Amino acid sequence: MAVTTIHFRYGGNRKMRNVFIFVLVLFSSCITRQSKDRFRNTSFCFAPTRTATVKAFSSNGYYQFEQVLDYRIGNTVKGEWEPKTSRFKVNMVFYPDGIFLFSYDVKNGFGFWGSYYVQKDTIYVQYLNPPGSMSNGLTQKKYKIIDYNTLELLDNRDKSDLPEGDKMAKFIAYDALPDPSKSWLKNKSWFWCNREEFKKWKAGQKENY
């Protein structure tokens, strides 16, 4: 369990502050049972004997979305809100064994680990914030396979509300992806469909070091 240090700049009851810190650390460090069950009791659990490789889309690189964020910022001089637009890239990795990496940062290898499975032309993904995050939220998304190099985000909202760049992802070949065996999620027994398979895999990992 991660340890979080908080510095208070105001007075107050020391006991209440300690309780607040304990609760914050508890909720920011532990994965809930509900999140665990949404992996091990569903099609999102990991099984090395169940290949997720599909020839219709690529797994030797990452898919990249161009996200468009519209927001408003306060102008203190004019005393009004001004509209702003930011554009940024979001990368996704689909490993052949069913491991998924969302918001992959090519420079530092960071991302949110999860899993995926495929039904016909649709990819279902689920990823989880790592332990120690301020939020341990679990997110599900689905994408349509357009062709070998293109995926489309399927969203519950009216598609007319989504900018075109927000819906389509293009494939970028890349041969230096992070090793999924070193991800924190794959090293959790509750992520696996079969705990005995997890134990065998874990023992093999130790032998390789």
Image: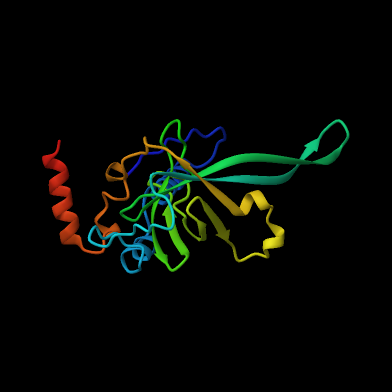
Residue 28 in percent (x, y) is at: 42, 48
Q: Nearer the viewer, residue 167 or 41?
A: 167
Q: Residue at x 11, y 41 (%)?
A: 207
Residue 133 in percent (x, y) is at: 44, 45
Residue 174 in percent (x, y) is at: 42, 37
Q: Nearer the viewer, residue 76 or 161?
A: 161
Q: Is residue 115 above or below residue 175?
A: below
On the picture, is 89 further left or further right than 20? right
Residue 87 in percent (x, y) is at: 65, 40
Q: Outermost residue toward the left?
A: 207
Q: Is residue 108 above or below residue 18?
A: above
Q: Quarter of the image for the C terminus: give it.
A: top left
On the picture, is 98 further left or further right than 87? left
The quarter of the picture where residue 195 lies is bottom left
Query: How is colour applied across the structure in the image?
Result: rainbow
The quarter of the picture where residue 162 lies is bottom right
Q: Nearer the viewer, residue 189 or 32?
A: 189
Q: Residue at x 47, y 55 (%)?
A: 137
Q: Quarter of the image for the N terminus: give it.
A: top left
On the picture, is 208 further left or further right than 90? left
Q: How many marks?
A: 0
Q: Residue at x 31, y 64 (%)?
A: 40
Q: Nearer the viewer, residue 110 or 26?
A: 110
